[in-house]
């Protein structure tokens, strides 16, 4: 039995699709399907499945580079770069916001009333009738 911890040594894993990241991203921007991208990569010598390409791109878009290793001028992904949303901007006139809020309130009330009206029909068999 070995005394070294499990997975303790060696180089970190790097996907065989990593060199093709820019190509995959460009093909997705061109609206190619995952299957079409997998065929293109296979044509270039890298065999993979459409699902593998999808999972790779999803994972790599979250974090392309190790922390602190981004090249100079690298822009973060829009989801990570944008601040969290705040309340409705005050640049809209108060009358518009008031009208919008009243429409939302009216829709909520109508929805509640419709949900209350829904009833369940219970069918009770008469005694002695076969089921």
Image: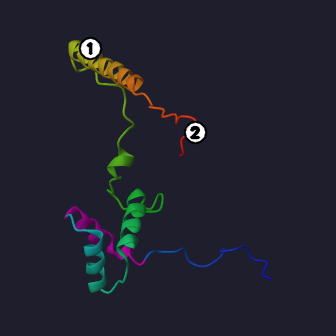
Residue displayed at 48% across by 58% down: 67
The quarter of the image holding the N terminus is bottom right
Q: Which residue range is magenta in the image?
A: 16-30
Residue displayed at 32% across by 74% down: 20
Q: Quadrant of residue 97?
A: top left
Say above or below: 101 vs 47: above
Residue displayed at 29% across by 74% down: 35
Q: Using residue 8 as the reference point, say whether residue 32 is left or right of it.
A: left
Tell me how far mark 2 sits from mark 1, CA to CA. Answer: 62 Å
Camera-side mark, 2 or 1: 2
Q: Residue 70 at x, y = what percent? A: 40, 60
* Structural crowding at the residue carrying mark 2, measured as other residues with C-alpha within 10 Å and reported as few (<14), some (14–19) or many (≥20): few
Q: Residue 90 at x, y = what percent? A: 28, 20
Q: Which one is nearer the viewer's eye here, 21 or 28? A: 28
**Helix, strand or loop status at disc 2:** loop
* Structural crowding at the residue carrying mark 1, measured as other residues with C-alpha within 10 Å and reported as few (<14), some (14–19) or many (≥20): few
Q: Quadrant of residue 6?
A: bottom right
Say above or below: 22 vs 45: above
Q: What residue did someone put label 2 on?
A: 128
Say above or below: 108 vs 94: below
Q: What residue did someone put label 1 on?
A: 98
**Helix, strand or loop status at disc 1:** helix
Judged by its main secondary structure, the magenta piece is helix
- Residue 112's disc is none
Residue displayed at 38% across by 23% down: 117
Q: Which one is nearer the viewer's eye here, 119 or 53? A: 119
- As drawn, the residue found furthest toward the front would be 128
């Amino acid at each position: 039995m070995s005394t070294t911890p499990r997975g303790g040594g060696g180089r970190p894993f790097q996907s065989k699709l990593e060199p093709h990241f820019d190509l995959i991203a460009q093909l997705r921007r061109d609206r190619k399907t995952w299957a079409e991208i997998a065929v293109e990569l296979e044509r270039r010598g890298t065999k993979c499945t459409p699902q593998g390409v999808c999972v790779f791109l999803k994972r790599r878009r979250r974090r392309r580079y190790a922390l602190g290793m981004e090249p100079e001028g690298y822009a973060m992904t829009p989801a990570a770069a944008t601040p969290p949303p705040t309340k409705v901007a005050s640049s809209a006139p108060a009358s518009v916001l008031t009208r919008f809020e009243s429409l939302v309130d009216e829709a909520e009330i109508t929805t509640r009333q419709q949900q209350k009206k829904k009833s369940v029909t219970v069918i009770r068999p008469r005694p002695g009738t076969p089921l």
